[in-house]
Amino acid sequence: MSQAFVFCPQSESWIYTGLNVEWLGLDTLELGKQKITCPKCGQLHEWTTEELVLRSDGAG
């Protein structure tokens, strides 16, 4: 599994969405628009699957 991140333009940092996905399953993931309160800047960010960046969680 990989952790899914989106970019916060205010803090210019990547924030974890709380979503864990398989690399191969990302293309079929249909979530529509999602919202997350950013832990860095406190603002509400909207994001879509196309904006996700995956990072391995190191769990092998």
Image (cartoon, grey):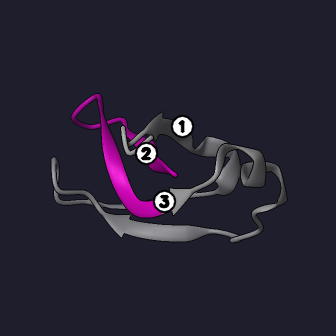
- For marks 1 and 2, the one nearer the N-term is 2
| Amino acid at circle 2 | Phe
Image location of residue 4, percent across then percent down? 48, 49
- Quarter of the rendering containing residue 34: bottom right
* Element at label 3: strand
**Above-or-below relation of 53 to 2:** above
* Element at label 1: strand
Name the residue at the right extreme.
Answer: 28
Report the mark closest to the observer, 3 or 1. Answer: 3
Q: Which mark is residue 53?
A: 1
Residue found 21% across the figure and 34% down from its top: 11
Residue density around tag 3, few if under 14, some if 14–19, many if 20 or more, within 10 Å: some
Badge 1 vs badge 2, beta-carbon distance below 8 Å? yes
Q: Which mark is residue 5?
A: 2
Q: Nearer the viewer, residue 47 or 25?
A: 25
Q: Nearer the viewer, residue 12 or 55?
A: 55
Side of 2 where 57 appears, left or right: left
Q: Report if residue 16 lies within the magenta region.
A: yes
Residue found 31% across the figure and 46% down from its top: 15
Name the residue at the front extreme.
Answer: 60
For mark 3, what is the residue?
20
| Amino acid at circle 1 | Val
Residue density around tag 2, few if under 14, some if 14–19, many if 20 or more, within 10 Å: many
Where's the C terminus, which quadrant?
top left
Image location of residue 13, percent across then percent down? 28, 31
- For marks 3 and 1, the one nearer the N-term is 3
Image location of residue 54, percent across then percent down? 52, 39
Badge 3 vs badge 1, beta-carbon distance below 8 Å? no
Start-end of magenta stretch: 1-19
| Amino acid at circle 3 | Asn
